Amino acid sequence: MALFSRIRTPATTAFRFRHFSTVSPNSSTSLSTHKKSRAALSRLKSEQDPDCILEICRAARLTPSSHIGRIALSVAISKLCEGNHFQSIDTLLQELRSRPDLQNNRFASHSLILYGQAKMLNRAVTVFDEFYNEGFCRSTKSLNALLVAGLIAKDHVEVKRIFMEFPQSLVKVFHF
């Protein structure tokens, strides 16, 4: 039986190499969003250059609406954080915020968590306030995302401050 598993046919070779594709912004073939995200994820795992990481994310048009997109964004943030490229992280998340298809509360919450993953909790608090100024409502979901960002960043003192101060500001906003 083991002998049959070693037989190489064109079908088995194609099956083995099915995940090794590249994402290029000027590619002639049209890939689905899922396939672009999967290809971007495989490239992001081996990439170290921050400019290339940003280009991969731009080319794949990653969004947190799909599971594979969230994983790819998380890997990109982790890679940039490992290299202390915090400006690149901020650039990536600012570019995502400017996209019209991501002008929703779900992305707002997810971006706060990504800032926490990058250990940029002060920036997450600033972005939380900016989202309110841009018209997104402060909700328990966005406040919980900010608290989770603090827990991921392991800044428990700031989490305590946020937990004590921000609910009072939410009460003022909602006029309870």
Image (cartoon, rainbow, N blue to C red):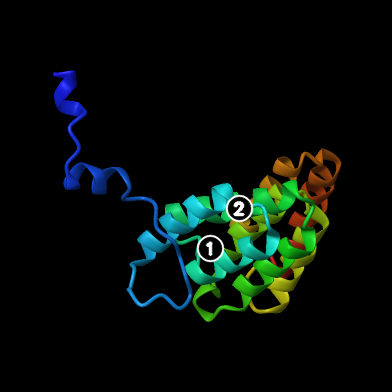
Judged left or right of residue 164, residue 48 is left
Q: Secondary structure at mark 1?
A: helix
- Residue 158, percent from left and from top: 84, 46
Q: Residue at x 71, y 55 (%)?
A: 115
Amino acid residing under circle 2: Glu
Give the number of the disc on residue 170: none
Q: Residue furthest top?
A: 1
Locate the N terminus and report the quarter of the image it occupies. top left
Crowdedness near tag 2: few (<14), some (14–19) or many (≥20) residues, C-alpha within 10 Å: some
Judged left or right of residue 137, residue 30 is left
Q: With respect to residue 62, does 27 lie above or below?
A: below
Q: Between residue 156 and residue 87, name the one nearer to us.
A: 87
Amino acid residing under circle 1: Arg
Q: Is residue 66 visible?
A: no
- Residue 133, percent from left and from top: 72, 77
Q: With respect to residue 113, does 107 lie above or below?
A: below
Judged left or right of residue 31, residue 122 is right
Q: Quadrant of residue 98?
A: bottom right
- Residue 123, percent from left and from top: 79, 61
Q: Between residue 71 and residue 58, name the one nearer to us.
A: 58
Q: Which residue is mark 2?
A: 47
Q: Is residue 44 visible?
A: yes
Q: Secondary structure at mark 2?
A: loop
Q: Which residue is mark 1?
A: 106
Q: Between residue 90 and residue 158, name the one nearer to us.
A: 90
Q: Residue at x 17, y 32 (%)?
A: 7
Q: Residue at x 44, y 61 (%)?
A: 22
